[in-house]
Image: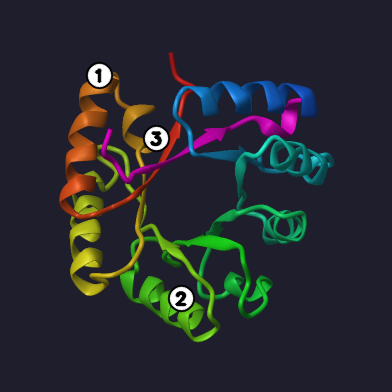
């Protein structure tokens, strides 16, 4: 009965789904524990109904984040009332106005550069924008151990910061017991006071 982890559950193919299908999936995820519904945008795929989807999910009282590598899609999401944007960096943070109510997830640019992540966090604080920091968890044999070390280092550098961990690169890309893997990662999150978890359910 006592927890402070916020679960972001991603619908990875939201761009290919109708608004009604997105709502059905979102409500299912919410009923099974998701605190925030993350709408995944696919590369080179138009998400013409993005604003409509956000409005409908908000109508049902759901928190919404939008996950895209396209700044213009993230800009549309912010204007449509999304609660969170995944992801911004020190350069793309400029799409949000000062004192924005939108809480972006900030990532390093280039990948793994914690200095850039700290700079982005500093810029956000100066502009009165609340943020969540994510140094990015990498898959096994593609920098997994080093990425764990980045989370430890980031917490040491930013003792008060809100931090996110996306476990999909591990749970979705490792043919192993997902519950056990997730439990171990949650242990790391607990020790480092990482209170935001991005999950995805796609692989069998």
Q: Where is mark 2, residue-wise? A: 120
Crowd class of label 1 (few under 14; some 14 to 19; many from 20; radius 10 Å): few
Q: Earlier in the sequence, mark 3 or mark 1?
A: 3
Q: Earlier in the sequence, mark 2 or mark 1?
A: 2
Q: Does the magenta-highlighted stretch encompass residue 16?
A: yes
Left or right: 44, with 84 as reference point: right
x 49%, y 39%: residue: 35
Q: Earlier in the sequence, mark 2 or mark 3?
A: 2
x 72%, y 61%: residue: 75
Left or right: 33, with 162 as reference point: right
Secondary structure category for the residue under label 2: helix
**x, y percentage for residue 166?**
39, 43
Q: Where is mark 1, residue-wise? A: 176
Q: Where is mark 3, residue-wise? A: 168
x 28%, y 33%: residue: 1
Q: Which of the 4 image quarters holds residue 161? A: bottom left
């Amino acid at each position: 009965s006592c927890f402070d982890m916020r679960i972001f559950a991603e619908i990875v193919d939201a761009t290919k789904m109708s608004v009604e299908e997105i709502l059905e999936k979102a409500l299912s995820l919410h009923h099974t524990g998701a605190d925030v519904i993350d709408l995944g945008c696919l590369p080179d795929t138009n998400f013409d109904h993005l604003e409509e989807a956000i409005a409908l999910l908000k109508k049902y009282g759901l928190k919404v984040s939008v996950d895209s590598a396209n700044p213009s899609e993230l800009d549309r999401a912010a204007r449509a009332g999304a609660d969170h944007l995944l992801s911004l960096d020190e350069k793309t943070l400029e799409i949000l106005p000062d004192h924005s109510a939108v809480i972006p997830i900030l990532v390093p640019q280039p990948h793994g550069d914690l200095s850039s992540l700290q700079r982005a966090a500093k810029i956000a604080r100066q502009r009165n924008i609340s943020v969540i920091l994510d140094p990015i968890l990498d898959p096994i044999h593609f920098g997994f151990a080093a990425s764990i070390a980045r989370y430890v280092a980031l917490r040491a550098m930013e003792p008060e910061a809100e931090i996110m961990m996306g476990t999909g690169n591990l749970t979705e890309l490792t043919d192993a017991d997902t519950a056990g893997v997730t439990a171990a990662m949650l242990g790391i999150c607990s020790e480092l006071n990482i209170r935001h978890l991005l999950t995805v359910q796609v692989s069998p």
